Image (cartoon, rainbow, N blue to C red):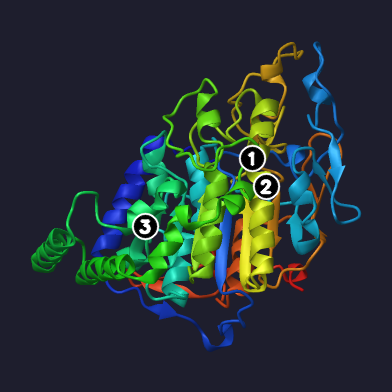
């Protein structure tokens, strides 16, 4: 069993990054028999439920047990009643009413099974989900978005091909998140354009406040000369140095392009903004609260994810290739429900329900949904009793009382990796379709059609016209876009 600690993870990731910087040009490798499939989608939007979204509290509800003092935790499978959706036979949990009304536009997977990585660390499972490889690795694995950016190139040459919205890297486990939110050995130009606060995205595409255009131009030219003149090794190999210079050119083109207006949410009519926000949230405010654990964080940031989805729609309209919007991973907050699971899940559903459903409706109205693949996912699920998988349990990280006497113990608090939900819309995916089945009683595990990350990635790549067998040469060996090139697309999901 792999028992890699955070320190081991960071140490190995840092060594891999240095190795990637020293590597040369990553050449594509693809056999003739593995020709790229026809593309069904041009853009991928990942809606990332960071922290572990409980499947039985969202898209796979089970028997509902309301709170009362003295509950036996073994009897609690869902803490919300179920509601119907637009598709007969598919039910969601209460709090997802707007998403339920658009279920006829997409596919629901209920059997995503996360990898067995030993003692559960969120950042390691997020690394696995986003790269397709379990950490640590001997090379700096590129993020899914970077692979797409490198393989397909930008849809619009002035718009970053890989845009990451909503995640800060100065919070808990920020360094671990940085380990996979990169282009790795592919080069800086394919890395993420990071926008932590979507309402401030416009600031990222204009010179700093108080700096004249002339001074900004001078500083940019000076930095490029310094990079170009630096000895090989300071910025990695010659290829990595050239990639960094190209990324600077790309950023400069965006600043002077009309497409930069897509980043400015103040240009969006207020009535449109309101549709993406939970009821009662002021659409004109700025969301930049500090990290707390007393509940004020959630109140202060309740609209960030919704604005991220609105920004994703605007960026999709101007030709972004890969966009990720996250509810943000911060230990013990958001979907990371180690306690107060019921109330936190209710808050998180308030954030995503209107935002995700409106994104789907807006893209559909604009004629973009068919060529845009939307994937809503999380690193794993949660359960009240089981840590890991029933047959591969790992050390418990949450104490569960024999009887539930307090609301803070009512909810799904342990990490569960034997089932999880993924929603897919657009991009050639079936409409109103359910895939996979889980048990109706605890352990609520996968019992039909398990989905592993390499096959989910293969499905995503296939939708975008990328062969799951594509590899890039690094350190004189192939690095496949699905683990060892073995990922198989789930053909049953395509229309």
| Residue at image coords 63%, 19% | 399
C-alpha separation, residue under disc 3 versus residue under disc 1: 38 Å
- Element assignment for label 1: loop
Query: Is residue 299 among what the camera can see?
Result: yes
38 versus 98 height, above or below: below
If you read the primary sequence from the N terminus, does the residue marked by circle 3 or circle 1 appear first? 3
| Mark 1 crowdedness (10 Å alpha carbons): few <14, some 14-19, many ≥20 | many
| Residue at image coords 45%, 67% | 147
Q: Which residue is mark 3?
A: 140
In the rendered image, residue 294, in percent from the top left (x then y), is placed at 52, 20
Front residue of this view, candidates 108 and 14: 108
Q: How many labels were placed on the picture? A: 3
| Mark 2 crowdedness (10 Å alpha carbons): few <14, some 14-19, many ≥20 | many
Q: Which residue is mark 1?
A: 278
Furthest toward the bottom, the residue is 32
| Residue at image coords 79%, 50% | 100
Q: Which corner quadrant holds the C terminus?
A: bottom right
C-alpha separation, residue under disc 2 versus residue under disc 3: 37 Å
In the rendered image, residue 482, in percent from the top left (x then y), is placed at 54, 66
Q: Is residue 325 left or right of residue 474?
A: right
If you read the primary sequence from the N terminus, does the residue marked by circle 2 or circle 3 appear first? 3
Front residue of this view, candidates 45 and 144: 45
Query: Is residue 479 among what the camera can see?
Result: no
306 versus 382 height, above or below: below
Residue 154, located in which quarter of the rendered image? bottom left
Q: Which residue is mark 2?
A: 354
């Amino acid at each position: 069993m792999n028992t890699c600690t955070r320190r081991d993870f960071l140490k190995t990731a840092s060594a891999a990054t240095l190795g990637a910087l020293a590597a040369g040009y990553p050449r594509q490798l693809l056999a003739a028999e593995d020709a790229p499939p026809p593309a069904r989608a041009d853009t991928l939007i990942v809606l990332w439920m960071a922290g572990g979204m409980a499947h039985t509290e969202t898209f796979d509800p089970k028997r509902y047990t309301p709170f009362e003092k003295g509950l036996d935790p073994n009897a609690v499978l869902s803490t919300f009643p179920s509601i119907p959706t637009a598709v007969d036979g598919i039910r969601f949990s209460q709090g997802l009413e707007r998403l339920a009304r658009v279920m006829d536009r997409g596919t629901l997977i209920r059997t995503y099974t996360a990898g067995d990585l030993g003692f559960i660390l969120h950042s390691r499972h997020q690394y696995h989900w986003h790269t397709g490889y379990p950490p640590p690795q001997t090379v700096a694995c590129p993020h899914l978005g970077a692979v797409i950016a490198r393989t397909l190139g930008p849809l619009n040459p002035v718009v970053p091909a890989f845009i990451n919205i909503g995640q800060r890297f100065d919070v808990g486990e920020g360094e671990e998140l940085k380990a996979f939110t990169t282009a790795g050995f592919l080069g800086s130009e394919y890395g993420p354009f990071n926008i932590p606060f979507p309402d401030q995205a416009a600031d990222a595409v204009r010179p700093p406040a108080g700096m004249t255009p002339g001074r900004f131009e001078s500083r940019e030219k000076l930095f490029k000369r310094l990079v170009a003149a630096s000895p090989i090794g300071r910025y990695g190999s010659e290829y990595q140095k050239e990639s960094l210079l190209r990324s600077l050119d790309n950023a400069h083109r965006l600043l002077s392009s009309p497409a930069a207006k897509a980043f400015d949410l103040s240009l969006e009519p207020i009535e449109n903004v309101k549709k993406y926000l939970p009821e009662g949230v002021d659409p004109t405010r700025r969301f930049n609260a500090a990290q707390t654990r007393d509940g004020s964080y959630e109140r202060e940031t309740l609209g960030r994810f919704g604005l991220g989805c609105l920004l994703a729609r605007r960026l999709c309209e101007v030709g972004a290739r890969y966009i990720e919007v996250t509810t943000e991973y911060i230990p013990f907050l958001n979907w990371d429900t180690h306690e107060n699971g019921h109330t936190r899940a209710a808050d998180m559903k308030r954030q995503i329900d209107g935002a995700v459903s409106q994104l789907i409706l807006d893209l559909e109205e604009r004629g973009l949904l068919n060529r845009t693949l939307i994937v809503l996912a999380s690193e794993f699920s949660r359960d009240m009793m089981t840590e890991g998988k029933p047959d591969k349990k790992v050390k418990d990280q949450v104490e569960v009382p024999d009887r539930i006497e307090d609301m803070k113990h009512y909810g799904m608090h342990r990490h569960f990796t034997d089932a999880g939900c993924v929603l897919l819309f657009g991009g050639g995916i079936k409409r109103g379709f359910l895939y996979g089945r889980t048990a109706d009683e605890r352990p609520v595990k996968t019992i039909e059609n398990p989905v592993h990350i390499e096959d989910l990635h293969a499905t995503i790549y296939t939708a975008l016209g990328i062969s799951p067998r594509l590899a890039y040469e690094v350190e004189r060996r192939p690095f496949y876009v699905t683990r060892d090139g073995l990922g198989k697309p789930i053909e049953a999901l395509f229309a």
